[in-house]
Amino acid sequence: MIALKWFLVLILILVIVAILAGQLGMFKGVAPNDLGIVEGRLKLPADTPNSVSSQADLYPNHPQHNYARIEPLPLVGDSKSTLSKIKAIIELMPGSQIITNQENYLYVQFTTRVMKFVDDAEFWFDPQSNVVQVRSASRLGKSDLGVNRQRIEWIRKQLEEISLK
């Protein structure tokens, strides 16, 4: 019984230390320096299953391209109004910070509330495909428990609801 109590105390201490480390920014990671559009593509998906990309199939030799694949976002109106709508949706999301806001491109950082993990997301109007290409990836770790995919799908749903109005 005493061993169980000490074990629980140890677990509690570890949780507190982890939360404190997160609050101090120790899980923030480093912002990628190679984001943006290069030769009509966003950056390839991460080597770990904590990213999604609508252009994952453009990298067939990349081992993670199958599960990283997500559909691009459809236009709701023209490209400019679609990106404006995406920006408005993102601005309402907790932990979001728009870093780059250009006519055809958005770069956003999403920070989790407690542990302060940061995900980098990009939205680019692709004039060749006439859609908004997306990429969202965690900076740290191997798994995000599907958070990046869920976030992009939530944005897709919000765009869909706007288009129905």
Image (cartoon, rainbow, N blue to C red):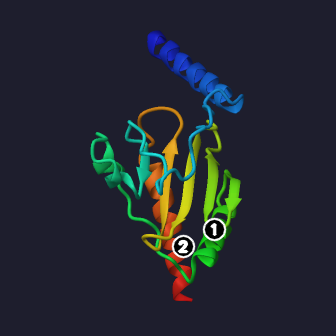
Name the residue tied to disc 1: 89
Which class describes the residues within 10 Å of circle 1: few (<14), some (14-19), or many (20+)?
some
Q: Is residue 47 left or right of residue 103?
A: left
Specify the label residue 152 is tagged with: none
Is 142 on the left or on the right of 62, as rendered?
A: right
Asked where in the image residue 50 lies, by quadrant, the reply is top left
Image side of residue 14 versus residue 87, left or right: left
Above or below, comparing residue 65 to residue 126 in the picture: above
**For the residue marked with disc 2, what is the amino acid?**
Gln
Residue at 38% in and 64% down: 71
Badge 1 vs badge 2, beta-carbon distance below 8 Å: yes
**What secondary structure is marked by label 1?**
helix
Left or right position of 13 against 74: right
Q: Which mark is residue 158?
A: 2
The residue most toward the front is: 39
The residue drawn where x is 51% and y is 41% is 138
The secondary structure type at the circle numbered 2 is helix
Crowding at label 2, few (<14), some or many (≥20) Cα neighbours within 10 Å? Answer: some
Query: Which residue occupies the foreground of this view, 132 or 89?
Result: 132
Residue 131 in the image, given as x and y percentages of width and height: 47, 71
Q: Where in the figure is residue 130, as x and y percent of width and height?
A: 46, 74
